[in-house]
Image (spheres, rainbow, N blue to C red):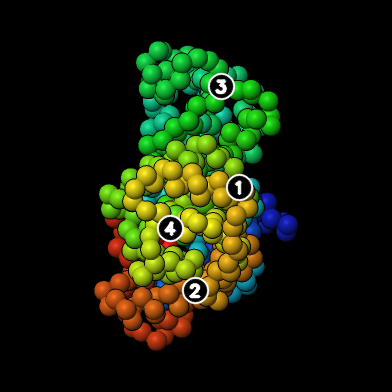
């Protein structure tokens, strides 16, 4: 059994002791600031006792807490009854339950990662890991990739000096893993698909993708490569992936299909990957009507629309269609995608405003980060629409007191070991 005792000197003559023993801390108005000051990294669960989704999350945090406390740089999990301690809820803009926030050296940030215990532990390790990990053997490289998991992209500098990527690693620490390999065999070169050094390889384990950069390693070119490769070539559009694009200024080439998982769509996605590799100044994404009908309908795409449909979205309230490329036929799709991009580059476009006031608020909340109330209203409204159409659908995990007062029971999306989740919902 491990136990680490930390004493924090308060402004008064008294001192408060905190023990890192693998248990979830209960915080309130009187001890919150003291606890946050005591630890470098704290994950705080703002919950309400009446919230069924909070009750479901709580055991996962109990399981994760000892694993995180046992790290070389311990991470502490704490919880606050935000319904009771309203001052704290107001201070940190808590609009729904449960809300998770990470406090790094006292500074809060939203937690948008997984909520199952094992995945949560792997995700949070990133925040206390070295900026750049030094790898000195093939086994060290393999172990690093294995431990990094699949949530973040992994950058490995083969034959690079640590100083070359240290600034990038600090700047993007919360978004990616960074390492340099000092010693490695030809087998590693084959595995990571590079044939000379120095080389910077980025891997996206979830998408089975990787890219190689051979320089020049000047700051401008290096940062362009790092930024453009933070995401896979073509990404599924969900709530989580949209939120992850918050600080990316590129426009999105959005392809809307009937079903993301059918063979025709998969074939088109492979074509889009080729287009994306040649147009890295744009983000390429796709969404299926079957997966997220409300989002697709925002761009004028529904079950009556000729699909696939391509648009360019600036992630605000307008999107562009290209004259003569309103939809993609099944024959020679590669040429049609090329013509669409040429038409966009040449300005042969029509600007259209996205539809639906609820979706407007939702999109604004995603990228402004200023008002989560829009998101809550959108989710609740979407739940009622979906429930009225499909009685078997279940709502995402978000609770308000009014919902609980109106219904004595709640249902929620079951968690799964699969990497797939319903689009438009928070991924657990």
The answer to whether the residue labelled 2 contacts the one labelled 4, judged by CB atoms less than 8 Å apart, is no
Residue 113 visible in the shown view:
no
The circle on residue 214 is 3
The answer to whether the residue labelled 2 contacts the one labelled 3, judged by CB atoms less than 8 Å apart, is no
The correct choice, above or below, for 164 with respect to 114 in the image is above
The N terminus appears in which quarter of the rendering? Answer: top left
Lower position in the chain sequence, tag 3 or tag 1: 3
- Report, in whole angstroms, how far the alpha carbon at label 2 lies from the one at label 3: 45 Å
Residue corresponding to mark 2: 378
The image shows residue 104 at horizontal and vertical percentages of 60, 48
The correct choice, above or below, for 125 with respect to 258 in the image is above
Lower position in the chain sequence, tag 3 or tag 4: 3
Q: Which residue does the image show at 53% across and 47% down from the upper left?
A: 341
Lower position in the chain sequence, tag 1 or tag 2: 1
The local crowd at label 4, few if under 14, some if 14 to 19, many if 20 or more residues have their Cα within 10 Å, is many
Q: Which residue does the image show at 57% across and 19% down from the upper left?
A: 160
Q: Nearer the viewer, mark 3 or mark 1?
A: 1
The image shows residue 203 at horizontal and vertical percentages of 45, 33
Q: Nearer the viewer, mark 3 or mark 4?
A: 4
The circle on residue 202 is none
Residue corresponding to mark 4: 327
The image shows residue 319 at horizontal and vertical percentages of 57, 61
Q: How many labels were placed on the picture?
A: 4
Q: Dot 1 lies on which element?
A: helix
Residue corresponding to mark 1: 345
Q: Nearer the viewer, mark 2 or mark 4?
A: 4
- Report, in whole angstroms, how far the alpha carbon at label 3 lies from the one at label 1: 28 Å
Q: Is residue 416 left or right of residue 350?
A: left
- Report, in whole angstroms, how far the alpha carbon at label 1 lies from the one at label 2: 34 Å
Q: Is residue 10 left or right of residue 208?
A: right
């Amino acid at each position: 059994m491990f136990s680490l005792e930390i004493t924090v000197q308060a402004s008064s003559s008294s001192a408060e002791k905190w023990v890192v023993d693998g248990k979830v801390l209960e915080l309130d108005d009187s001890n919150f600031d003291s606890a946050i000051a005591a630890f470098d990294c704290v994950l705080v669960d703002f919950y309400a006792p009446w919230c069924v989704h909070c009750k479901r999350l709580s055991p996962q945090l109990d399981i994760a807490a000892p694993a995180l406390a046992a790290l070389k740089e311990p991470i502490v999990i704490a919880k606050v009854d935000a319904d009771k301690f309203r001052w704290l809820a107001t201070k940190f803009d808590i609009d729904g339950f449960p809300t998770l926030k990470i406090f790094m050296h006292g500074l809060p940030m939203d937690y948008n990662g997984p909520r199952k215990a094992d995945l949560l532990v792997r995700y949070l390790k990133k925040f206390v890991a070295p900026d750049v990990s030094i790898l000195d053997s093939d086994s060290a490289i393999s172990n690093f990739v294995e431990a990094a998991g699949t949530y973040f992209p992994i950058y490995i500098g083969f034959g690079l000096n640590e100083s070359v990527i240290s600034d990038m690693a600090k700047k993007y620490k919360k978004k990616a893993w960074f390492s340099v390999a000092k010693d490695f065999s030809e087998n590693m070169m084959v595995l990571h698909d590079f044939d000379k050094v120095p080389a910077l390889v980025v891997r996206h384990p979830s998408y089975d993708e990787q890219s190689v950069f051979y320089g020049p390693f000047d700051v401008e070119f290096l940062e362009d490569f790092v930024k453009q490769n933070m995401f896979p070539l073509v990404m599924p559009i969900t709530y989580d992936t949209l939120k992850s694009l918050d600080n990316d200024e590129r426009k999105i080439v959005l392809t809307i299909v009937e079903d993301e998982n059918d063979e025709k769509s998969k074939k088109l996605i492979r074509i889009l990957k080729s287009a994306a590799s040649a147009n890295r100044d744009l983000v390429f994404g796709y969404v299926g009507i079957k997966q997220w009908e409300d989002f697709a309908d925002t761009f004028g795409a529904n079950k009556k629309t000729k699909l696939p449909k391509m648009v360019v979205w600036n992630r605000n309230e307008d999107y562009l269609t290209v004259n003569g490329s309103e939809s993609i036929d099944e024959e020679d799709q590669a040429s049609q995608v090329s013509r669409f991009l040429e038409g966009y580059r040449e300005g042969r476009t029509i600007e259209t405003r996205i539809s639906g006031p609820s979706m407007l608020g939702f999109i604004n909340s995603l990228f402004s980060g200023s008002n989560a109330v829009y998101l809550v209203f959108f989710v609740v409204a979407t739940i009622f629409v979906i429930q009225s159409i499909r009685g078997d659908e279940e709502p995402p995990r978000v609770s308000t007191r009014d919902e609980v007062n109106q219904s004595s029971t709640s249902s929620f999306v079951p968690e799964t070991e699969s990497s797939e989740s319903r689009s438009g919902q928070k991924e657990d």
